[in-house]
Image (spheres, grey):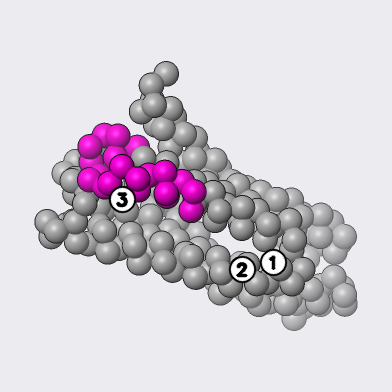
Amino acid sequence: MTGYELLLLLHILLFVYWLGGDLGVFYSSGYISKPELPPATRATVAKIMLALDLTPRVCLVLMLPVGVALSASMGALAIPGWAVPALWVAALAWLAMVVTIYLKEHQPIAHTLTKIDWGVRLAVIAGLVLAAGSSLIGQGPVQGGWLAVKMLIFAGTIVCGLIIRVKLKPFGVAFGRLMREGSTPEIESDLHASIARVKPAVLLIWAGLVVNAWLGIAKPF
């Protein structure tokens, strides 16, 4: 297997596990909002959902260095030779932070790292938009329009993820009340409404992943 083939395989696997993990998280969230289930059962479902959610987060982080390395090996991205190794180092540090946030949930370090992670995501969004936007007008490093659009869509999926975080904050509050106080109509309504609010952003992520997969295959422009 050549280096290009390995990168392509990793790229495909990251797409599969990202979309599959997201589907599992969304499906599990439906059980958390079922009032007929006892709080203890829903607490177990929540643990499963959080574990599943780690997979898309890992895939998002690794998609960046794998995608850049793959694009550079194809000649679709003109960057210095040191850029790919440097990006891998940065991405692995980011990945370690993401995993630590999951493992140290509810601890002070997780709260601090979550703020840093938010800043990293904003920086990645800005970098992707700048590189892709400048390339679409003929001034950037991306050689194919299809790749520039893929980068913009990828940035969009990260934006959607941040929107989901913000809109899910009431869910955490309502779920905490469910564990302490038990089920009430108010709490059940808050849980259901929180999940409903994030559905458009979730669907946009799924659509973006599918469109990006097609762009990578078809390279239409």
Whether residue 101 is visible, yes or no, is yes
List the single residue furthest toward the front. 82
Q: Are marks 1 and 2 in contact (CB under 8 Å)?
A: yes
Q: Residues within 10 Å of mark 3 (few under 14, many from 20)?
A: many
Q: Residue at x 45, y 51 (%)?
A: 206
Give the amino acid type for the residue marked by disc 1 in the picture: Ala
Q: Secondary structure at mark 2?
A: helix
Q: Position of residue 161 (x, y in %)?
A: 50, 63
In the picture, the quarter occupied by the C terminus is top left
Answer left or right for 24 relative to 125. right
Mark 1 crowdedness (10 Å alpha carbons): few <14, some 14-19, many ≥20: many
Of circles 2 and 3, the one toward us is 2
Residue located beneath label 3 in the image: 150
Q: Position of residue 145 (x, y in %)?
A: 19, 49
Q: Amino acid at mark 2?
A: Thr
User: What amino acid is labelled 3 in the image?
Assistant: Lys
Name the residue nearer the viewer: 143 or 190.
Answer: 143
Residue on which disc 2 sits: 114
Give the Cα distance between marks 1 and 3.
Answer: 31 Å
120 lies above or below 170? above
Residue at left 68%, top 57%?
Answer: 100
Residue stretch in magenta: 70-90
Identify the mark nearer the N-term, 2 or 3: 2
Quadrant for the N terminus in the image: top left
Circles 2 and 3 in contact, beta carbons < 8 Å: no
Residue occupying the point 61% across, 57% down: 98
Confirm whether residue 64 shows in the render: no
Give coordinates of residue 61: x percent, y percent.
50, 51
* Label 2 packing within 10 angstroms: few (<14), some (14-19), many (20+): some
Q: Magenta stretch mostly in which secondary structure?
A: helix
Marker disc for residue 110:
1
